[in-house]
Image (tube, helix red, strand yellow):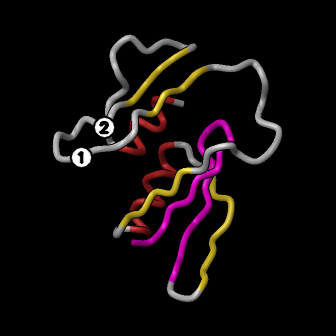
Amino acid sequence: MAAFWSEALGRPVNAGANSEFAAINATDPATTGPRLAFHQVPEPKTVKNRLHLDLINSEYEAEAKRLLGLGATHIRDMKQGDARWTTLADPEGNEFDLIAG
């Protein structure tokens, strides 16, 4: 999962990653942001995500195509007023939204 999110966010996986634990820091000095940590668990996903990421991008169509090329799965497209977003799932089925910004 760290490899997918590394590519999706344009941030490298931290050194020392293995199949049980990996992390991605906000590496751009001009950017602050959370450290994303990935821990392998034995249980499969059975219900809605406990964490849901929204990715906002001004190049909406190109970014959707890029994420799908990385292994994301299209779930649904939504439009509400002027707001437009697509719900995708990462390779393990965790849903996230791409929002036109």
Say left or right for 92 vs 82. Answer: right
62, 26: nearer the viewer: 26
Please state which amino acid type lies under the numbered disc 2.
Ala
Say left or right for 83 vs 32. Answer: right
x, y percent for residue 34: 39, 39
Task: Tell me the quadrant of the picture where the C terminus can be found.
Answer: bottom left
Residue for badge 1: 31
Q: Please tell me which residue is depicted at 43% across the width and 25% down the height of the picture.
A: 23
User: In the rendered view, would you say 65 is above or below 71?
Assistant: below
Task: Tell me the quadrant of the picture where the N terminus can be found.
Answer: top right
Question: Residue 61 appears in which quarter of the rendering?
Answer: bottom left
> How many numbered badges does the structure rendering display?
2
User: In the rendered view, would you say 74 is above or below 78?
Assistant: above
Q: Give the residues in magenta.
A: 83-101
Q: CA distance from mark 2 to mark 1?
A: 7 Å
Q: Please tell me which residue is depicted at 57% across the width and 13% down the height of the picture.
A: 20
